[in-house]
Amino acid sequence: MLDRYQVKATFFEIGRNIEKHPEIVKMIVARGEELANHSYSYKSLLPSRSRRNII
C-alpha cells in the first residue's frame, strides 16, 4: 500500500521484536522508512477482557 501511493511511514518498533527479527528492521531502513523506538518490551496495561470492550 505504501508503494502504491508513494508514501513513507514511521514504524515504532519494540526492541525485543527487533532482536527476534533483524531482517525486518534492515528492510525498513533500506526502504528509507523511519524507525522509532517504542520501548524494549511492551506489556498492555489493560486486562484481556477490557480490550474486547474497547473495540
Image: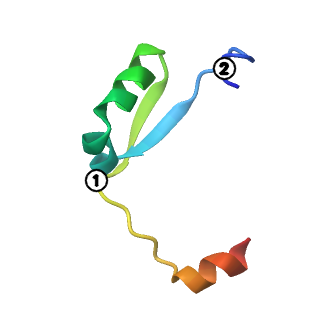
Which residue position holds label 2? Answer: 7
Q: Say whether disc 1 or disc 2 marks the residue closer to the N-terminus.
A: 2
Mark 2 surroundings: few (<14), some (14-19) or many (≥20) residues within 10 A? few
Q: Which quarter of the picture shows residue 18?
A: top left
- Where residue 30 appears, as percent x and y from the top left, is 41, 14
Label 2 residue SS? loop
Q: Quadrant of residue 37?
A: top left
| Residue 41 located left or right of residue 11 | left
Q: Residue visible at 44% across and 24% down?
A: 28
Q: Is residue 6 above or below residue 42?
A: above
- Amino acid type, mark 1: Tyr
Q: Quadrant of the N terminus?
A: top right
Q: Secondary structure at mark 1?
A: loop
Across and down, in percent, residue 24 comes to 39, 30
Q: Residue at x 25, y 42 (%)?
A: 19
Look at the numbered discs 1 and 2 and tell me whether their residues touch, using CB distance below 8 Å: no
Q: Which mark is residue 40?
A: 1
Seen in the picture, residue 38 relative to 18 is either above or below; the reply is below
The amino acid sitting under disc 2 is Val
